[in-house]
Amino acid sequence: MSSLSIIIPTLNEAGSLEKTLRYLTILNPLAKEILIVDGGSTDATIAIAKHCLHFFPLSIDVQILKSNGKGRSVQMNYGAKYATGDFLCFLHADTIVPDDLVTVIQQTLTNQKVVCGGFISLMTGTQTTRWGISLHNYLKTYYAPLLFRPHSFMKGLRLLFGDQVMFCRRQEFWECGGFDEKLAIMEDGDLCLKLAKKGKIQLVNRTVTSCDRRVAYWGVWKATVIYLYIGILWGIGADANYLKRFYEDIR
């Protein structure tokens, strides 16, 4: 059975990390290893990560790494360099996964025609589920490549984003060069474009839940406009680093 490495980039995630890690302790079966890659947190993120080490059984290797720079691309590539599993799973620090995560990933990538996969993301807060935003994110997986890369869409391209818990084979990840560390955002979509040259990208019929903090801060309508604006401009070739100015970090 192929093994799974879970890579979690963190930067000031003290409010979310413990819950995410606690759910990883009940995976059945367990992942081979969990790599928490910090980009220079100034809050209690590292302390919480160290505290959570005691929750995991000895059979799973949990490491806390400090990358040489911050940014999800840099941190996720850094974690992937240390990973030893056959499969890589990139998990945001505010996202909760199902307890059969490992099995779902293994079964999906058993199909050699599939090079990458992700989950349906439900955006949730403490008292609400953002059904409209979640539905749009689901549809965007399909309509974005259909609109902007129709030829590739017919060959199996789907656009996945970080909240969808992307996973792939470690070998193919590096054959594609990993995440582009020059990109401030849209590194996930860029990886999909590169991996799609090797095979199909699949959205599995399972859900994960992610924090709605950005939508809560912006408001639903502003968030929807920003997501559409960034997506359309990126789709027609705008520089992702220019688009980052519209996508502020919110903790």
Image (spheres, rainbow, N blue to C red):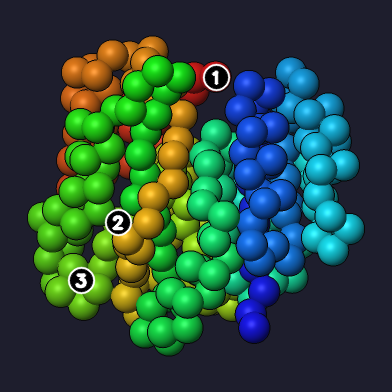
At 47% across and 77% down in the image, what residue appears? Answer: 107
Residue 210 coordinates in the image, percent (x, y): 45, 36
Look at the picture and state if 24 lies above or below 204: above
Residue 185 coordinates in the image, percent (x, y): 43, 39
Graded by Cα atoms within 10 Å as few (under 14), some (14 to 19) or many (20 or more), the crowding at tag 2 reads: many
> Which residue does the numbered mark 3 point to in the structure image?
152
Determine the image quadrant of residue 127.
Answer: top left
For marks 2 and 1, the one nearer the N-term is: 2
At 50% across and 63% down in the image, what residue appears? Answer: 167
Q: Is residue 38 visible?
A: yes
Q: Are marks 3 and 1 in contact (CB under 8 Å)?
A: no
At 55% across and 34% down in the image, what residue appears? Answer: 94
Residue 113 coordinates in the image, percent (x, y): 37, 84
Look at the picture and state if 84 lies above or below 148: below
- Residue type at numbered disc 1: Arg
Q: CA distance from mark 3 to mark 2?
A: 11 Å
- Residue type at numbered disc 3: Ser
Can you say which quadrant of the picture contains the N terminus? bottom right
- Residue type at numbered disc 2: Leu
Could you tell me how many numbered marks the image carries? 3
Look at the picture and state if 41 lies above or below 190: above
> Which residue does the numbered mark 2 point to in the structure image?
159
> Which residue does the numbered mark 1 point to in the structure image?
251
Determine the image quadrant of residue 159.
Answer: bottom left
